[in-house]
């Protein structure tokens, strides 16, 4: 009986390539539609209030609330993008589209132990490592 053991180590492709492949749906952020809107004082309901100062105070409070919500959406957009990028990059090494082979280690009880590991480097490409591994095992 012959024993063969191998392990493939992967890592993400360079960030420039990841950035090209990364997508993020900003429209999925709750309140995204607020970003395109401007505050409209005519939408503020003030019931039967006749006092101009009370109406102005209500409009000002509504304006501040609107701006606070809009700022919150902008913050969610920023953190959402950063979180999505971190998750994308964290999984990149395991994807056929965003990962690359960095090394292949193998062992066979009938081989010379010096043939047990290949690394991608300046002179050996990912293709070379995979081709050699497949030809050898």
Image (cartoon, helix red, strand yellow):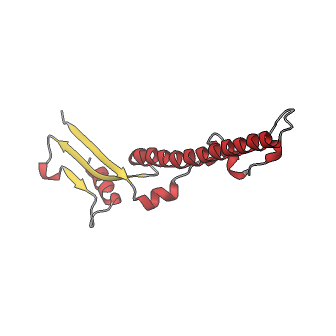
User: x and y percent of residue 34 in the render?
Assistant: 69, 46
Could you tell me residue 119's position as x and y percent? 25, 56
Farthest bottom residue in view: 123
Residue in view at x 74 percent, y 52 percent: 38
- Image quarter of residue 127: bottom left
Whether residue 136 is situated above or below residue 124 in the rendered picture: above
User: Which picture quadrant has residue 49?
Assistant: top right
Confirm whether residue 95 shows in the render.
no
Query: Closest to the observer: 53 or 122?
Result: 53
Percent of width and height locating residue 46:
82, 36
Q: How many marks?
A: 0
Residue at (46%, 60%) from the top-left corner?
17
Relative to 85, 40 lies left or right: right
Residue 88 at least partly seen: yes
The residue sitting at 63% across, 42% down in the picture is: 28
Quadrant of the frame with the N terminus: top left
- Comparing 66 with 107, the one in front is 66
| Residue 60, horizontal then vertical, whole percent | 72, 45
Q: Nearer the viewer, residue 1 or 38?
A: 38
């Amino acid at each position: 009986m012959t024993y063969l053991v191998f392990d493939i180590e992967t890592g993400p492709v360079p960030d420039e390539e990841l950035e090209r492949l990364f997508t993020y749906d900003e429209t999925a952020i709750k309140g995204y539609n607020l970003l395109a809107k401007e505050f409209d004082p005519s939408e503020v309901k003030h019931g039967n209030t006749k006092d101009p100062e009370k109406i102005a105070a209500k409009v000002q409070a509504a304006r501040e609330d609107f701006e606070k919500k809009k700022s919150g959406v902008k913050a969610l957009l920023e953190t959402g993008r950063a979180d999505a990028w971190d998750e994308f990059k964290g999984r990149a090494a395991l994807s056929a589209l965003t990962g690359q082979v960095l090394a292949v280690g193998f062992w066979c009880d009938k081989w010379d132990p010096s043939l047990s590991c290949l690394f991608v480097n300046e002179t050996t490409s990912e293709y070379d490592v995979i081709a050699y591994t497949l030809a050898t095992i």
